[in-house]
Image (tube, grey):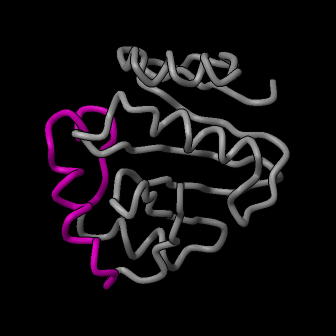
Amino acid sequence: MNYIQVQSEKDQDVPYLLSVHRLPEIKRFIGIDEANYFRYVTTTENVFYFKAYWNEKLVGTVHCELKDGVLYLSILVIPGFQRRGIGTEILRDMQKKAFPLSFDRIVASIEKQNDASLGLFRKMGFVRVEEDGELVDVSWPA
């Protein structure tokens, strides 16, 4: 897997990624402010947004925020590439610290009804640490 950090809201893939975020199956679990999201992830300190490529195809994204040694993470696998091990590979790369980020722990907040994501994170050794309304927080290492 190859990762490229989005450094500008004018990145050539931003229009396509916005269209992916509009898809009902994505929008259901990951909501963004389309007018400001890419400005936020490209100009905010300790916030990083990576495009994930597999065989030279854009297959997903990774949104990361660092705070006090904790990496808060959100993964998006583009429909059409789901259920092919992409999410597993991204998490494995995170756990191996293949990204240019320094952290002690990874935390993700997942919608309770997102069984696929909850199963993926559980399979990769994440444990539930908190539930708040409709969200489940998982952590690695616990």
Q: Nearer the viewer, residue 43 or 141?
A: 141
Kindly identify the residue that appears in the image at 60 percent across and 17 percent down: 123
Q: Tell me residue 80's x, y (percent).
A: 22, 39
Q: Nearer the viewer, residue 53 or 110?
A: 53
* Image mark count: 0
Q: Nearer the viewer, residue 68 or 6?
A: 6
Compared with 56, 69 (above or below) is above
Toward which corner of the image does residue 65 lie, by quadrant?
A: bottom right
- List the single residue furthest toward the front: 55
- For the C terminus, which image quadrant? top right
On the rendered structure, is 141 left or right of 48? right
On the rendered structure, is 141 left or right of 18? right
Compared with 28, 135 (above or below) is above
Magenta stretch holds residue 76: no
On the rendered structure, is 14 left or right of 85? left
Kindly identify the residue that appears in the image at 61 percent across and 17 percent down: 122
Kindly identify the residue that appears in the image at 16 percent across and 58 percent down: 19
Q: Tell me residue 74's x, y (percent).
A: 50, 44
Compared with 7, 34 (above or below) is above
Q: Which residues are magenta?
A: 10-33
Q: Tell me residue 124's x, y (percent).
A: 65, 24
Q: Tell me residue 41's x, y (percent).
A: 47, 68
Kindly identify the residue that appears in the image at 28 percent across and 80 percent down: 12
Magenta stretch holds residue 12: yes
Q: Nearer the viewer, residue 118 or 136?
A: 118
